[in-house]
Amino acid sequence: MRFIRRITQNLTIAIPVAMVLGLAFGLVFPTGWLKALIVPLTFLMVYPMMVGLKLSQLREGGHARVQVLAQAVNFLVIPFVAFGLGLAFFPDRPFAAVGLLLAGLLPTSGMTISWTGMAGGNLPAAIKMTVLGLVLGSVMAPFYLMLLAGARVPVDLGAVFVQIAVIVLLPLVAGQLTRSELVRRHGMPGFQKDWAPKFPPFSTLGVLGIAFVAIALQARVLAAEPAAILWLLLPLLALYAANYALAVVLGRAFLSRSDAIALTYGTVMRNLSIALALAMNLFGSEGTEAALLIALAYVVQVQSAAWSVRFAGRAFGPKPA
């Protein structure tokens, strides 16, 4: 567990290492059999974060302004920015564009809560934002994919809903049953202290496994075109820069400091685990380019979040005494 936690705390190193290992593996060994690992690795990514999810947050009132602003940014702005960047950077590579769209389409993750806490933001608002983002994203993602990506890649609406059920709803039900049983046995304080922290690191193993598989399946293509990695990074940097800028402007104009920080991490931190799983499961071998882009998004997301915490005081003012 110590080793897994250390990996989780050093994702900016761990993900590139997994990608390099995947590249080396894909150049030396046959990779077709790796596709069988996608579904179990997907479950390993998503299930642990569902155990810590408190669905009852949706029934609690308060934080209305920051919630409305966050979901407006998440569903009325960022998907269309991602779609436009995909058209601009990948006019002849539709699956790379779909990867960028998926990275911009599914908001919030456990990172939303952790980074909000580290920056001194409104944690209750961030928790509710995470639950609401997951629910809305699961419902709306199929329609956004059909509307924005359907003209460039084959999108089967029914298949997307099935994948959402397998990737989101099944782990959600399993996670909530696990949570209920652990709370029943150990009480809420015991669950929060002894059990809740044990689950998220295992999600990291799933992320690293999927990153490894995505790179291994594309290894020979990447070896032939190493500049492809740089071209995938550029629109990701533009997407995250635009997201941070918008969040800071809206936060400073309309929200208190703590709510503005929650808004920032509730919009910039995307649910890349589910995006990665959808890319790998919906589009088969053609989806590996999309998965590669989303794997790179982990590096940009974690690194940018770490730096943004340092600049929270400059962006939103010092913490109140």
Image (cartoon, rainbow, N blue to C red):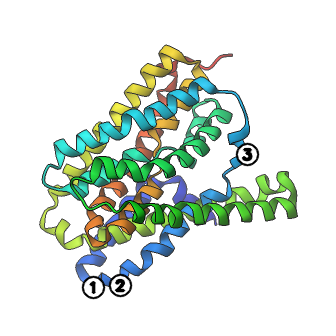
Look at label 2 and name its amino acid: Trp
Residue 56 got which mark?
3
Residue 30 got which mark?
1
Gap between marks 1 and 2 measured at Cα: 8 Å
The answer to whether residue 24 is seen in the rendering is yes
Splitting the image into 4 quarters, where does residue 248 fall?
top left
**Residue shown at 19% from the left, 50% from the top:** 231
Sequence-wise, the earlier of marks 1 and 3 is: 1
User: In the rendered image of this protein, does residue 90 appear above or below residue 16?
Assistant: above
Question: Which marked residue is nearer to the observer: mark 1 or mark 3?
Answer: 3
Check disc 1 and report its element: helix, strand or loop: loop
Sequence-wise, the earlier of marks 3 and 2 is: 2
**Image location (x, y in percent) of residue 65:** 58, 23
Residue 33 got which mark?
2
Look at label 1 and name its amino acid: Pro
Question: Which marked residue is nearer to the observer: mark 1 or mark 2?
Answer: 2
In the picture, which quadrant includes the C terminus? Answer: top right
Gap between marks 1 and 3 measured at Cα: 46 Å
Dots 1, 2 in contact, CB < 8 A? yes
How many other residues sit within 10 Å of disc 3, few (<14), some (14-19) or many (≥20)? Answer: few
**Left or right side of 79 for 113:** right
Splitting the image into 4 quarters, where does residue 169 fall?
bottom right
**Residue shown at 30% from the left, 78% from the top:** 25
Q: Residue furthest front?
A: 158
